[in-house]
């Protein structure tokens, strides 16, 4: 599916089951940077990979794309093989997450007001991990892992604590390959969890 403008891209994203977005960052009108920020603010926006396509390949241009919310960056000109490999890499991850069944998490009544905001923050931090691992920012990854480790179990998210501990340890070891696997796991887990309040499951806000 292709969109001729930024407004059309946002509407398409809202209506269609999109597994990956290839974003021309230099579109006329609303540019790709603004579109990405708006997509990330939508309910599914944190889960879907967005790959920036630009005419620039300098490190500072890649950084600007990642800071805007893109998952990855491809500078023009690029080969068909490069683009196909990028699409397959992220589409496979997204389809695996979408196909997985929801994980219900019973929530104590005393925590009912705190969990939705905490879950939103955890999902945002998990999304940041994709950029941080590309930058090999192991210290920032370690801090997020440490936060997950401490915050998950008290709210009933035991798996988040387990994964957070592993992420913290692997970041200390600067084990990028193993970290990529744990990051994919925690992102999938947080996308699937559904808090259950008084027997009623709530999906992502």
Image (cartoon, rainbow, N blue to C red):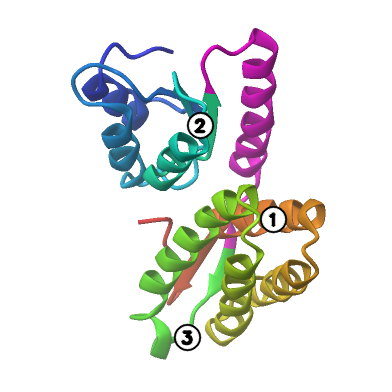
Q: CA distance from mark 2 to mark 1?
A: 31 Å
Q: Residue at x 58, y 50 (%)?
A: 130
Q: Is residue 200 visible?
A: no
Q: Of the numbered discs in the image, which one, if any, rests on residue 108?
A: 3
Q: Which residue is mark 1?
A: 185
Q: Nearer the viewer, residue 179 or 8?
A: 179
Q: Position of residue 198 (x, y in %)?
A: 43, 77
Mark 2: secondary structure? loop
**Dominant SS in magenta:** helix
Q: Residues within 10 Å of mark 2 (few under 14, many from 20)?
A: few
Q: Which of 90/173 is in front?
A: 173
- Residue drawn where x is 70% and y is 21% of the image: 85
Q: Compare marks 2 and 1 and give the one earlier in the sequence.
A: 2
In the rendered image, the quadrant that contains the C terminus is: bottom left
Magenta extent: 75-103
Question: Label 1's element?
Answer: helix
Q: Which residue ends up furthest to the bottom in the rendered image?
A: 110
User: Horizontal placement of 72 versus 200: left or right?
Assistant: right
Q: Which mark is residue 58?
A: 2
């Amino acid at each position: 599916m292709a969109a001729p403008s930024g407004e059309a891209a946002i509407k398409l994203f809202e209506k269609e089951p999109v597994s990956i977005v290839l974003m021309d960052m230099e579109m006329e009108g609303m540019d790709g940077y603004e579109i990405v920020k708006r997509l990330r603010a939508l309910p599914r926006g944190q889960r879907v990979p967005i790959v920036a396509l630009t005419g620039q390949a300098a490190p500072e241009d890649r950084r600007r794309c990642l800071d805007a919310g893109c998952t990855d960056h491809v500078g023009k000109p690029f080969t068909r093989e490069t683009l196909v490999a990028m699409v397959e890499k992220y589409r496979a991850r997204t389809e695996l997450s979408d196909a997985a069944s929801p994980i219900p998490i019973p929530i104590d009544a005393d925590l009912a007001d705190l969990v939705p905001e905490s879950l939103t923050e955890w999902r945002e931090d998990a999304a940041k991990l994709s950029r941080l691992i590309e930058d090999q920012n192991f210290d920032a990854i370690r801090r997020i892992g440490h936060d997950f480790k401490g915050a998950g179990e008290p709210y009933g998210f035991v798996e988040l604590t387990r994964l957070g501990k592993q992420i913290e340890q692997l970041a200390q070891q600067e084990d990028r390959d193993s970290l990529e696997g744990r990051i994919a796991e925690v992102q999938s887990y947080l996308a699937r969890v559904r808090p259950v309040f008084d027997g009623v499951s709530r999906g992502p806000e």
